Image (cartoon, grey):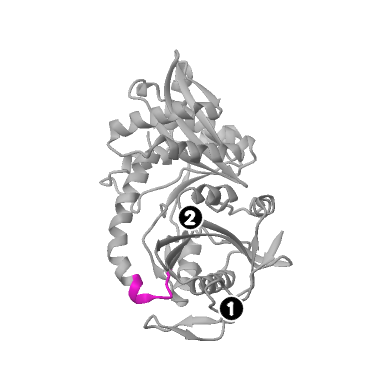
Amino acid sequence: MLARLNRSSTTGLPLTEAVSSAGTPVRAEMRPEASPVEFIRSQAEWDGALAQLGNAHFLQSYAWGEFKRLYGWHADRILIGDAGQPLGYASLLTRRLAPGLWVGYVPRGPILIQPCADTLAVALASLETLARRRRLLWLKVDPEIWDEEATAWAAPTMQERGWRKGSEVQFRNSVVLDLSEPEEALLARMKPKARYNIRLADRKGVSVDQAAAEGLDELYSLYRETANRDGFIVRPLSYYRALWSSLLANDMATVLFARHNGRTLAGIVVVAYGPNAWYFHGASANEGRNLMPTYLLQWHAMLWARQRGCRTYDMWGAPEVADTSDGMAGVLRFKLGFGGTLKQGLGAWDYTPWPALYSLYGYAAPRLLAIGRQFRWRSQQHV
């Protein structure tokens, strides 16, 4: 059921509260661009609405918010506009940094029904109101708006409303494939090396099977093997089991293994939400890499996504600069080999009602996030 947001918060701050440039709360009328917001409590209602949108993202799914609750975040699912004329959706995650100090994040959102400068401005205004009301130190958004749209109207709209370019949490760029063509066309669009390696793995007898929840421990073991080889730190099994189990339980993911003569060579987690799919996590064994199991896995991931009705396959991340000197240049070549398009995203933007505190926080946060990005990149992308 939809529950309309009350016009007074638990902090006692009215919706019309604003903040001066010095960071001091002042009284001001709500900006005219702001729209009413409503909370959606029902998972079926939330996912049912988002899954109909071409720009749906699994980080805005109900299941993702529930998973984040396990690690200290609070999730609110917000309809921007009203049930009669919705403009967009935002799954808002908030977390306490210290007593009386909270931060907020809308991962890969807000999701706009009709993306344009006007609807983005309304969505931002509504989120700004919530940020002031909840006394957030900052509110971060990183809506998935690509290429020309990002530079032509999205970034200028963010700047006009006083949002600042923030440190990235997700990868700003990615490689995205169009799955709407027949299988033969998908193969033809690939670069010769990728197509050859898929067929090589098949000729050498590599098989791909779809695992159930009982395969998660095996996947984690393979993940640790990859971490030891590539030099990154993995989280405890409990974290990944909770994450992968949540996605599987909500029928949003599959785990695929590539095997040869009884040996498990590689595994990946593929996520689907609405009309889109993502290559989420990958791992490979030290042995058998010459059999090209990761190429065959990616092909089977695309086939699985097509069977789900997905129209795009996002390979989840690309470097900021497509440069051969970049440490992840090999990963980018691997991804582009499947015929996808390198997409440049809008990236992360921050709004703060408290500029002075935000500046102090901003001194340390980029350094910590940079370390985190390197960890995520190496822990998610393996060829």
Q: Residue furthest right?
A: 84
State which quarter of the image contains the N terminus. Answer: bottom right
Q: Residue 330: percent from the left, percent from the top?
A: 33, 39
Q: Is residue 335 magenta?
A: no
Q: Residue 86: percent from the left, percent from the top?
A: 67, 65
Q: Is residue 376 left or right of residue 253?
A: left
Q: Say which mark, if any, is on residue 73.
A: 2
Amino acid identity at mark 2: Trp
Q: CA distance from mark 2 to mark 1?
A: 28 Å
Q: Going from the N terminus, do you reach mark 2 or mark 1 first?
A: 1
Nearer to us in this view, 56 or 364:
364
Q: Where is residue 261, by image quadrant?
A: top left
Q: Where is residue 87, by image quadrant?
A: bottom right
Local SS, label 1: loop
Q: Residue 286: percent from the left, percent from the top?
A: 33, 24
Q: Residue furthest top?
A: 261
Local SS, label 2: loop
Q: Is residue 305 left or right of residue 160?
A: right
Residue 58 shows in the view: no
Q: Residue furthest left?
A: 325
Q: Residue 304: percent from the left, percent from the top?
A: 58, 33
Which residue has dot 1 on it? 33
Which portion, as a residue range, is magenta? 351-358
Residue positioned 30% across, 70% down in the render: 360
State which quarter of the image contains the C terminus. Answer: top left
